[in-house]
């Protein structure tokens, strides 16, 4: 192991919790989940119970209240040690990519409605980018919705492609990036 001074005692204590969780709940199942091509929702809920989801979300909504990305790094490192790609990395997608949108864009009522489930693992977040050419930069999407949804920019230029909703294959309702 490489010696680093990036992490403090709290991070290493958290690492112990994450490592135990990964060894107990993730590592024994990685091959099965990867072969099945799915994320185990029971494991995701257990991650919530273990305090691994929503560490940066406000405590009043069940989160850890720790706006320190190093905790997220610890989770990612421990999942990588177990070679837990899609089956384990759903936790990092949830925490690192999706939850910041909730943290910054939810009003009080929305936060009270969504954050507890996002922290407990009862709700699993995901992100889909449906505009060809946008790549991994969701903010570079050019299409804008109807004027009633986007009053400042009624343009409908750009293009869209279909994105199924998770493993259910259900077609999502259109969402317009404005």
Image (spheres, rainbow, N blue to C red):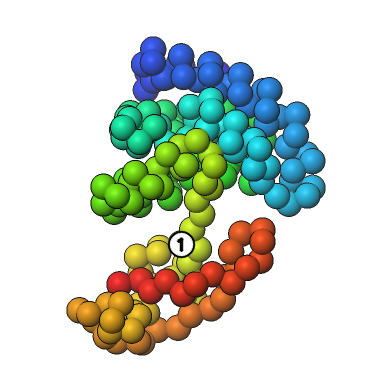
Q: Residue at x 45, y 16 (%)?
A: 12
Quarter of the rendering occupied by the C terminus: bottom left
Q: Nearer the viewer, residue 144 or 158?
A: 144
Residue 16 against residue 159 in the figure, above or below: above
Residue 79 figure quarter: top right
Residue 89, position as x, y percentages in the image: 58, 42
Q: Residue at x 68, y 28 (%)?
A: 25
Q: How many marks?
A: 1
In the rendered structure, the answer to whether residue 109 lies left or right of residue 128 reads: left
Residue 111 against residue 6 in the figure, above or below: below
Residue 153, position as x, y percentages in the image: 24, 81
What residue does disc 1 label?
Answer: 136
Q: Residue at x 20, y 79 (%)?
A: 152
Quarter of the rendering occupied by the N terminus: top right
Q: Nearer the viewer, residue 66 or 9?
A: 66
Q: Residue at x 60, y 31 (%)?
A: 46
Asked if residue 74 shows in the view, the reply is yes
Residue 149, position as x, y percentages in the image: 30, 77
């Amino acid at each position: 192991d490489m010696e680093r001074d990036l992490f403090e005692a709290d991070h290493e204590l958290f690492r112990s919790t994450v490592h135990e969780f990964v060894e107990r709940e993730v590592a024994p199942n990685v091959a099965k989940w990867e072969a099945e091509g799915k994320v185990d929702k029971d494991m995701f809920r257990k991650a919530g119970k273990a305090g691994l989801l929503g560490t940066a979300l406000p405590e009043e909504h069940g989160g850890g209240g720790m706006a320190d990305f190093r905790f997220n790094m610890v989770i990612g490192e421990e999942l990588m040690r177990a070679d837990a790609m899609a089956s384990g990395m759903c936790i990092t997608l949830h925490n690192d990519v999706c939850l910041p949108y909730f943290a910054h864009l939810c009003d009080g009522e929305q936060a009270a409605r969504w954050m507890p489930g996002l922290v407990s693992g009862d709700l699993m977040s995901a992100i889909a980018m449906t505009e060809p050419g946008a790549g991994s930069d969701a903010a570079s999407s050019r299409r804008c919705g109807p004027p009633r949804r986007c009053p400042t920019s009624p343009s409908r230029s750009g293009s869209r492609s279909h994105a199924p909703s998770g493993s259910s294959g259900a077609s999502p309702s259109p969402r317009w990036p404005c």
